[in-house]
Image (tube, rainbow, N blue to C red):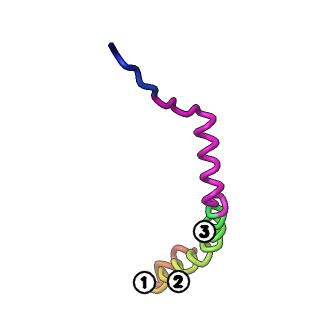
C-alpha cells in the first residue's frame, strides 16, 4: 500500500508579486534609487569640470588651441 503525503502548493504569480512588492516597500528601494539618481545627476557637472581640468594639465597647449579652433 502506498502512502500519499501532502505537499504544500507553490504560490501563484499574484502571491509572488505581492510578496515582491512588500519586500521592496519594506526595504525602501524606490527611495534609495531616487537618491542615487539625484546625486548622480548632481555629480555629472563637477566630474566633467574635473576631467577637463586634468586634460588641460596633461595636454599640449597647441593641441588644445587646435581643438578649440
Task: Give the class, few, some or many, for how many residues have Cα within 10 Å of label 3's Cα (few <14, many ≥20).
Answer: few
Q: Quadrant of residue 28?
A: bottom right
Q: Which callout, 2 or 3, points at the residue further toward the start of the chain? A: 3
Task: Give the class, few, some or many, for how many residues have Cα within 10 Å of label 2's Cα (few <14, many ≥20).
Answer: few
Magenta run includes residue 15: yes
Overall secondary structure of the magenta section = helix
Determine whether, in the image, residue 7 is placed left or right of residue 36: left
Q: Quadrant of residue 38?
A: bottom right
Q: Which residue is mark 1?
A: 58
Q: Along the line of sight, which residue is nearer the eye, 48 or 37? A: 37
User: On screen, 4 above or below 22?
Assistant: above
Q: Give the SS element for disc 3.
A: helix
Stretch in magenta: 7-31
- Residue at coordinates 45% horizontally, 29% vertically from top-left? 7
Q: Which residue is mark 3?
A: 40
Q: Along the line of sight, which residue is nearer the eye, 37 or 1? A: 1
Q: Which callout, 1 or 3, points at the residue further toward the start of the chain? A: 3
**Which numbered marker is on residue 38?**
none
Amino acid at each position: 500500500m502506498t502512502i500519499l503525503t501532502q505537499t504544500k502548493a507553490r504560490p501563484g504569480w499574484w502571491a509572488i508579486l505581492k510578496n515582491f512588492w512588500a519586500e521592496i516597500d519594506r526595504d525602501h528601494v524606490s527611495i534609495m534609487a531616487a537618491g542615487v539618481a539625484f546625486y548622480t545627476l548632481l555629480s555629472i557637472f563637477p566630474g566633467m569640470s574635473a576631467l577637463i581640468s586634468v586634460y588641460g594639465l596633461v595636454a599640449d597647449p597647441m593641441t588644445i588651441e587646435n581643438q578649440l579652433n
